[in-house]
DNA sequence: TTTCATGTTCAGCA
DNA sequence: GTGCTGAACATGAA
């Protein structure tokens, strides 16, 4: 479930632990996480080069090498990076390890949905993946324009990586909770599958005040989550992240948290707070 | 033993 | 083209 805040923490971790050291070894023990490159070629391309800079777009992390290429990492649902001394044992489920002189950087992924590739140009890769602007680079007017151009529900739009990059299930729920907006806003009428084209309903139906609120909370939630190192137990008590369960008491003390299901995804929200 | 969770991609449908 | 739905992917926890 790494979303923007988690990946930003990973980015800082790599930046602080692993740059400007020669890569002396590569252990690509699980080819499944390699994206479009063999273990052999990845090793050849990396040995002797140094990691030079980090770049994040949404949930995607790039680590530029001084050779010009860049590692492209996606963390799927359970992946993370683990830096350490060379001698430190590597965590269980380590899929790839870079040895950097006296240190090592492990890519660990229990469920193996994560991917590591090597790309020539991060900007081009971002384009190929169809990623929209990073959620933290969005201005209020940018968000307004995205909402205006979208016909889907608010949750769907927030989580659409081609519209806004970086927001997933957890943080879309939190942002909408903090902004006190109904995640279903703009959704088609669920009680009548035929009454689909209601021009009053789409996400563009937000007032200026509501979309301003959404923009402010989007930034605030993501920034505070990063400050909390993306660890829920360090996030404010009043956040929905602590109450993601159907029937849980609303963290604001109002009503009861409910679950809204759409296309196999579950959103949690408080009908009393969010409208 | 079965179900669930989670991000992405993809096929199928309205 | 747009948006929704469900399946697939991998794996461990409930």
Image: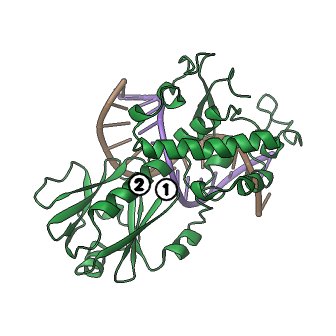
Chain colours: A green, B purple, C brown
Q: Which of the two discs, 1 and 2, labels the residue nearer the N terminus?
A: 1
Q: Is residue A1 visible?
A: no
Q: Chain of mark 2?
A: A
Which residue in the structure is indicated by mark 1?
A59
Left or right of residue A161, residue A66 in this image: left
Q: Position of residue A95 (x, y in %)?
A: 27, 58
Q: Nearer the viewer, residue B8 or A81?
A: A81
Task: Name the image quarter holding residue C2.
Answer: bottom right
Disc 1 crowd, CA 10 A, few/some/many (<14, 14-19, 20+): many
Residues at marks 1 and 2 touching, judged by CB atoms closer than 8 Å: yes
* Figure check: A228 above or below A260: below
| Quadrant of image for the C terminus of chain A | top right
Disc 2 element:
loop
Which residue in the structure is indicated by mark 2?
A75
Q: Nearer the viewer, residue A165 or A220?
A: A220
* Figure check: A124 above or below A62: below
Q: Position of residue A129 (x, y in %)?
A: 56, 66
Q: Nearer the viewer, residue A210 or A71?
A: A210
The residue drawn where x is 63% and y is 41% is A217
Disc 1 element:
loop
Extreme bottom residue here? A67
| Quadrant of image for the N terminus of chain A | top left
């Amino acid at each position: 479930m790494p979303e923007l805040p988690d990946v930003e923490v990973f980015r800082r971790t790599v930046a602080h632990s692993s740059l400007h050291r020669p890569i002396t070894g590569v252990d690509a023990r699980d080819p499944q996480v390699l994206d479009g490159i063999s273990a052999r070629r990845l090793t050849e391309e990396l040995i002797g080069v140094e990691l030079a800079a980090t770049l994040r777009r949404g949930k995607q992390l790039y680590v530029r090498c001084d050779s010009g290429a860049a590692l492209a990492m996606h963390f799927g649902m359970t992946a993370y990076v683990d830096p350490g001394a060379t001698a430190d044992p590597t965590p269980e489920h380590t899929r790839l390890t870079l040895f950097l002189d006296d240190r090592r950087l492990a890519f660990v992924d229990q469920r193996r949905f994560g991917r590591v590739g090597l790309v020539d140009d991060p900007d081009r890769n971002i384009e190929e993946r169809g990623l929209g602007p990073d959620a933290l680079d969005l201005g209020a007017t940018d968000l307004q324009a995205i909402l205006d151009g979208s016909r889907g529900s608010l949750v769907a739009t927030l989580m659409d990586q081609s519209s806004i990059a970086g927001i997933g299930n957890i943080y879309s729920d939190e942002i909408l909770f903090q902004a006190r907006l109904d995640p279903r806003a703009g959704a088609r009428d669920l009680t009548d599958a035929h009454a689909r084209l209601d021009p009053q309903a789409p996400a563009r139906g937000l007032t200026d005040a509501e979309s301003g609120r959404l923009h402010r909370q989007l930034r605030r939630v993501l920034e505070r989550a990063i400050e909390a190192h993306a660890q829920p137990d360090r996030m404010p008590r009043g956040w929905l992240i602590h109450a993601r369960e159907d029937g849980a008491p609303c963290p604001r003390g109002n009503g009861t948290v409910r679950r809204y299901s759409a296309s196999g995804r579950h959103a949690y929200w408080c009908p009393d707070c969010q409208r």
